[in-house]
């Protein structure tokens, strides 16, 4: 709402760091990178956001309380993604013009897509969540391999020898 109030009218750049970072009010009725499915974009992408929120909430709830205490990266990632998706969903239904975007990065005529803080939170959260899940997968695979080596070592030991060094 501050972007709408302070940056109006639309599409007029306000320099923040020279030409590299500008704040430019824009509305995005579609999804990321201005994808659109026509006049129903608002509702279709709103429904996708609701589904994403449910999935993120379930991911959070599926992780037990003990596990959550030990994985602050995953909790932060889920929180960022959830907060960003919720913020964009609120924006989408608050304004028929679409989600309010205002961060404009680039150099001269070479500009990245205009985005907002919620978009950044979703992106950083998704990357951090993927990293956290891949780290968990690597640790799980390493533990499984170690257990299999231990079982194989005990199976190769002569009868009466435990293979544990006792």
Image (cartoon, rainbow, N blue to C red):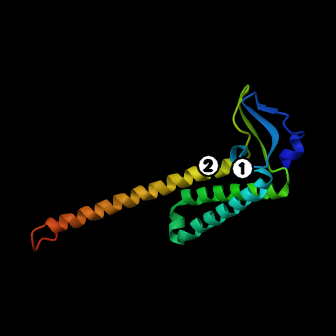
Q: Tell me the tag on residue 124.
A: 2
Q: Residue at 69% across / 43% down in the picture?
A: 33
Furthest residue toward front: 38
Q: Position of residue 161 (x, y in %)?
A: 12, 71
- Judge left or right: residue 151 versus residue 134: left
- Which quadrant, please, contains the C terminus? bottom left
- Judge left or right: residue 75 versus residue 14: left
Q: Tell me the tag on residue 31.
A: 1
Relative vertical location of residue 157 with respect to residue 139 in this rendering, above or below: below
**Within-10-Å neighbours for mark 2: few <14, some 14–19, many 20+:** some
Q: Position of residue 58 (x, y in %)?
A: 60, 68
Q: Earlier in the sequence, mark 1 or mark 2?
A: 1
Q: Position of residue 146 (x, y in %)?
A: 29, 61
Relative vertical location of residue 20 with respect to residue 136 in this rendering, above or below: above
* The quarter of the displayed image where residue 110 is located: top right
Q: Are marks 1 and 2 in contact (CB under 8 Å)?
A: no
Q: Residue at 73% across / 44% down in the picture?
A: 34
**Within-10-Å neighbours for mark 1: few <14, some 14–19, many 20+:** many
Q: Residue at 76% across / 53% down in the picture?
A: 41
State the CA–CA distance, disc 1 to disc 2.
Answer: 17 Å
Q: Tell me the tag on residue 80.
A: none
């Amino acid at each position: 709402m501050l972007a709408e109030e302070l940056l109006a009218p639309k599409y007029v750049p306000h320099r923040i760091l020279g030409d590299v970072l500008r704040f430019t009010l824009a509305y995005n009725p579609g999804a990321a990178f201005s994808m659109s499915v026509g006049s129903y974009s608002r509702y279709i992408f709103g429904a996708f956001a609701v589904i994403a929120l449910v999935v993120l909430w379930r991911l959070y709830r599926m992780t037990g309380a003990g596990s959550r205490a030990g994985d602050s990266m995953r909790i932060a990632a889920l929180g960022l993604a959830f907060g960003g998706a919720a913020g964009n969903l609120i924006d989408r239904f608050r304004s028929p013009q679409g989600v309010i975007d205002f961060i404009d990065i680039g150099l001269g005529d070479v500009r990245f897509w205009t985005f907002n803080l919620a978009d950044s939170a979703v992106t950083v959260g998704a990357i951090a969540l993927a990293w956290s899940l891949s780290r968990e997968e690597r640790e799980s695979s390493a533990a499984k391999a170690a257990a299999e080596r231990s079982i194989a070592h005990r199976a190769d030991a002569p009868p009466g020898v435990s293979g544990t060094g006792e």
